Image (cartoon, grey):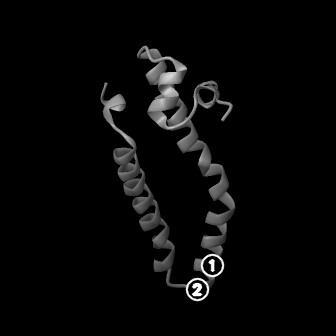
Amino acid sequence: MADEEQGPDEARAEADRVLAAVREALRLLESIPDAAVRARAAGLVLREWAGEKALPAAIRQQAVDTLHRGGMDFPEIGEAIGTDRSRAWRIWKGMS
């Protein structure tokens, strides 16, 4: 499986690519010409940002599920994603 072939270096590169895109999107706040509107918009983003962490958690859970349905056990999944088997299981169950 392609997911299993990528190591920590590839994962870091992909995470960096995504984070760069997120930073670029957040920089759009700087382009709001009215300072009051810019400040209010930035405040709204700050307030709503915490809720957005659910998306990467769901993506991670789906990826762990894909690995598990592909035949990997939780010790193997833990090793593949850089954690232990119990955390891999908790991610799969949506508990972490």
In the rendered structure, which amino acid carries the disc numbered 2?
Ala
Residue 39 locus on image (x, y percent): 63, 78
Pointer 1: what residue?
39
> Distance of mark 2 from mark 1, alpha carbons?
6 Å
2 displayed left or right of 16: left
Pointer 2: what residue?
35
- Image marks 2 and 1: residues in contact by CB distance under 8 Å: yes
The numbered disc on residue 17 is none
- At x 64%, y 24%, the residue is 93
Is residue 4 or residue 36 the one in the foreground?
Answer: 4
Is residue 47 or residue 72 the one in the foreground?
Answer: 72
Q: SS class of the residue under badge 2?
A: helix
Figure quadrant of the C terminus:
top right
Residue 35 locus on image (x, y percent): 58, 85
Is residue 69 or residue 6 the one in the foreground?
Answer: 6
- At x 61%, y 43%, the residue is 54
Residue 15 locus on image (x, y percent): 42, 51
> How dense is the environment of label 2, judged by Cα within 10 Å: few (below 14), some, or many (20 and up)?
few
- At x 34%, y 45%, the residue is 10
54 displayed left or right of 68: right
Report how many numbered discs are placed on residues in the image: 2
Residue 95 locus on image (x, y percent): 68, 31
Compared with residue 70, is residue 23 higher up or lower down, i.e. above or below?
below
Figure quadrant of the N terminus:
top left
In the rendered structure, which amino acid carries the disc numbered 1?
Ala
Q: SS class of the residue under badge 1?
A: helix
78 displayed left or right of 53: left
